[in-house]
Image: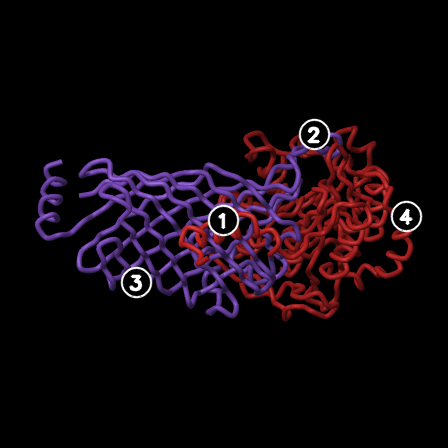
Chain colours: A purple, B red
Amino acid sequence: MTWFLAIHSQAQDLGIENKLTLSFGPSILARQDLIFSPNIHNDFSFLNFGLGYTREAKLYQTVRLNYAGFNPMVIDPYEFTEYGEFETAYPHSFNLVDLDYSLGKKVLVTEKSALTIGGMFSTNIQAMNYVYGRFSNFGYFATLGLGAFVQDKFTINEKSHLTATLQLPFVSWLSRSPYLVNDDEFIENIFSHSGFKTFMAYLGDGQLATWNKLQTFDLEAKYSYTLSERWDLSAAYAFEFIHASQPRNLLSFRNALNLSATLKF
Amino acid sequence: MRPTGKTIALAVLSVFLFGCEKAFIEPPATNPEAIFENLWTTYNEEYAPFEERQIDWQAVYTTYRPMVNSSTTDAELFDVLSEMLGTFDDGHVSLTAPGREIYYSNKIRRELIDDELFSIPVIKTYLESGYKVGDEDSYIYGKIKNDNLAYIYFDYVGDNFFKLNDFLNEFPDVYGYIIDLRHNQGGDFTYCFSEIGRLTDQTRFVFKSKTKNGKGPDDFDDWYDWSIHPKGSYVNKPIIVLTDRYTISAGERSVMAFATLPNVTTTGDTTNGAHGTMIGRELANGWFYSLVPQKVLLSDGKSYEGIGLAPEIYSKNTMTGIDAGIDQTLEKAIEALK
């Protein structure tokens, strides 16, 4: 606590603001990945959590980690039998993790707004277990992207702010499951029987992708209310768009309503 | 009137929330004819071993398509699709639907032909007490009673193959080993390939495979060679690998690997003959099916898809024998190793 107060006091003296944000809220996924299915997979989930750290000084820096889990299925789970024994067909399982780092600078400050622009590095890792009744197939999608971000912060009144942020990777290292779920290279990648080595091998099989092969962006509109000198409460609408054309078409829309609490120090 | 920022924001939000569905590629419809077309087309574009299984898929369409119309019921559709998939007789092909028994294309798996000729309780009677058993009999290993021989059974190909090393360590002084891959359900053959290293003193080419990478009949990745490599202290003793009609998929690829070793003799019945990797697919009505997007050629350059791997020494248990507690194939292996 003493350490925290010391940091807080020193930061205020230097005009530096640090923020730690914890968020959660419902999200909706609509996703069609032709590697696995011609169907559109929709799901609504409360498994959507985020943790962020922002430092505002001469430069603006933020690191955000977000997890979302979805369990879509074309129809409701159902029972079937295998040699007379009852089995259940369960939904697919999608685990989506985003880790973004942004570094920028305020370029236009007026009485009512502040415009910040800069560069960003984004990591998007998606692990999917497609369940087909009696068995399942593993699928993955991962991007490591470099791009730009733009953020505009509007002051509504002394206690309320509206912040709009656009993150736009221009070039990415893109790794996806092969054309038909698995192939010899995919099988070779699991040969180590080590989760980390397999993950690195999947990443290694990726390719550099610009906007001709991968289109993705994140958009967020956040309303913040200053509760006290230390705390802000926020409600944000977040939208993620992913379209990849290779090796087969993937289109994914994710909408989320994130409620968050921010500790300022 | 100029649009305000608020109007623009609402318009953009509406597009995101309500306009997304239109951006997707139109998914297949749920009516019986569309379901049939989607399933047939997917096999046409993604199934690899048509030639090996001597299937004229276009002729199959001509036969079965007229059996489905807009008023076909779910039960009728399931029957038609099942019968159509039955033409493959492929151990990897199946159809799953709500409230129904899984349809296996392979007649042996579907009708459980000779399934009872393999009995784990009978096998256990051949082992000295203190034998090791994995969860749900994922592996069983121990010493054969009254003989200086060691036996190991693998139910599938997965992390249970890590036990191969323990098995070899535990029985270093036996005359020979029996590796039982009868009724092996398959899995991930890389576990066998990574754990077999102590049984080979040199790199040995096992098989090559190639996977579909497009919709055309000739759209495949390049051939990929799979070999086994020496790893750990070499064990050079006579080995008998047991197989039967239920040895399938990764179980068969494991048999291919063992069969490259000069000190191995395969004994039992021909394997199932379903070698390529298997993937799942789903229909618009929520039914699931599976197919094979891969061709496999053994080290002799031939495909045994739909044929199976014939043992060097043929042996098949009888029901009379099993009922009497006798595993004739296991006994033949024991006799051969004595």
Q: Residue at image x 22%, y 55%?
A: A111
Residue named by callout 1: A254
Q: Is residue A142 left or right of residue A233?
A: right
Camera-near label (2 vs 4) is 4
> Circle 3 — which element?
strand
According to the image, label 2 marks what residue? A86
Please name whichever residue, B28 or B210, is drawn nearer the observer in this view of the structure: B28
Q: Please, which chain is the residue tagged with disc 4 on?
A: B
Q: Label 1 is found on which chain of the structure?
A: A
Q: Which residue has dot 4 on it?
A: B67
User: Is tag 2's residue or tag 3's residue first in the polypeptide sequence?
Assistant: 2
Label 1 close to label 3 by CB (< 8 Å): no
Q: Position of residue A83 (x, y in %)?
A: 75, 33
Q: CA distance from mark 2 to mark 4?
A: 30 Å
Q: CA distance from mark 2 to mark 3?
A: 57 Å
Which residue, as the protein is rendered here, is positioned at the far front?
Answer: B1
